Amino acid sequence: MKPLYLVIVSLVCAVAAVAGPASAGPADITVTSSSIDPPVLMKGDTGMLTVTIQNNGADPVSIKSARLFGSGVVALSDSYPSVGEIGAGNAKTFTFTVRADAGEGTFYPMFVLDFVNAGSLRYPVPVQVEDTPLSISVIRKPDAFAEGRTADITIRVANPRPNAASGVQVVPQGTGFSVTPSSAFIGALSADGSGTAVFNLTPAAETTAAFQVVWRNGINTHTADLVLPIPFGEDKRQADPLITNVEVRPEAGGYRIVGDVMNAGLESARSVLVTPGAPATPIDPFRVYVVGTLDPDDASPFEVTLRADASATEVPIIVEYRDDDGNRYTTTTMVGVGGALAAPPDEGDGGIPLAGIIVVALVALGVAGAIYYSWRRK
């Protein structure tokens, strides 16, 4: 007869053989990773939270359900009501849609696994919420705007957030101006990255332009705005034609004014014309003097001919030019003609020129001398 303890051991082994291998316990299930897209939410943003678990035991584990709950960052999607069995060494991923309902900070929504036999696994998932938007600034614009004059404006967009922004574009908005392009696409900006967009803006009146940055944080769209006033004023870089080395020469019927025109500005003056202004009257041969293009620091001679009243002490000389956009500008320089240089009488007024009187007198003296010499010889 066998001892009693051998009988008991035999019975236990038999029962174990009939029941099969024992199931692994909840302690064999661990959370191996968690992530959220986008990595950092803004208030009101929606994201996708992913949790991955793994069975580190030698036997399968039966899981009843998986759920996510918490405050600040709340779950929008349903829980997993029936998960099933996870085999030894296998992993499984759960995905939840969440929304950031609170302000800035780090929140810990709770991931919970409920097992079939008993017990549960609870794992807090960290989620960061930060409301810092993209920044926008003007890094290049003219010193002053002018009606009809095209100005280059460079906008810089920077990303001070701890995660990347995607789909970044800049859209000009407003009235009273035309602008090209109508929008500029920058694309993705990494954390602490930046990009630029260049616009050609032509104002028709003093106005205000707005530049709106549109970007995405994950699937969430956000905007940031920059307002740029556009007042009119004098551009410090524009062409600046000056009249120098002026000489006034009286001529029959009018004046001839000669001199130099110089561009003292920082941009080219194009289609430069020099002409007398009212009340002076341009006359041939140089009613208008065509200079052409004057680059910065260039100079060109000119001469114009005109008629002015005898009482005039100065006359206007007008320089007309255009900028690179075809806008027309004029500058006026007053040139003194003086009383001593008053306009001489017209050729058709019947007067005898002084030179003619002198010639006649010399001829008369010559004739008289010849007659006198002939008389003495007799």
Image (cartoon, rainbow, N blue to C red):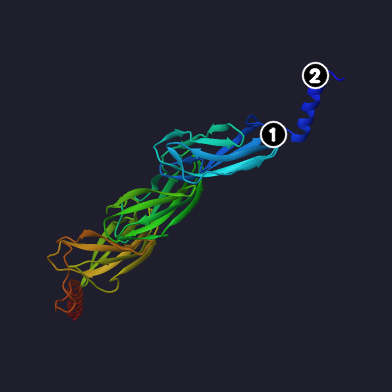
**Residue 363: quarter of image:** bottom left
In the rendered image, residue 196, in percent from the top left (x then y), is placed at 46, 49
Badge 2 or badge 1: first in the primary sequence: 2
Q: Nearer the viewer, residue 115 or 13?
A: 13
Q: Amino acid at mark 2?
A: Tyr
Mark 1 crowdedness (10 Å alpha carbons): few <14, some 14-19, many ≥20: few
Q: Dividing the image into 4 quarters, which one contains the N terminus?
A: top right
- The residue that mark 1 highlights is 23
Decide if residue 20 is in sight here.
no
User: Between marks 2 and 1, how big is the CA–CA gap?
Assistant: 27 Å
Q: Is residue 92 above or below residue 26?
A: below
Q: Secondary structure at mark 1?
A: loop
The reply to whether the C-beta atoms of the residues labelled 2 and 1 are less than 8 Å apart is no
The image quadrant of residue 123 is top right
Number of marks present in the image shown: 2
Q: Count residues near mark 2 (Cα–Cα under 10 Å), then give few for <14, some for 14-19, many for 20+.
A: few
268 up-or-down from 143: above or below: below
Q: Nearer the viewer, residue 197 or 19?
A: 19
Q: Viewed as shown, does residue 315 lie left or right of 203?
A: left
* Lateral position of residue 251 relative to residue 350, left or right: right
Q: Where 258 falls versus 20 (above or below)?
A: below
Give the x, y percent position of residue 115.
60, 36
Callout 2: SS: helix
User: Disc 2 designates what residue?
Assistant: 5
- Residue 301 location in percent, x, y? 35, 61
Residue 223 coordinates in the image, percent (x, y): 39, 49
Indicate the amino acid at tag 1: Ser
Q: Residue furthest front?
A: 1
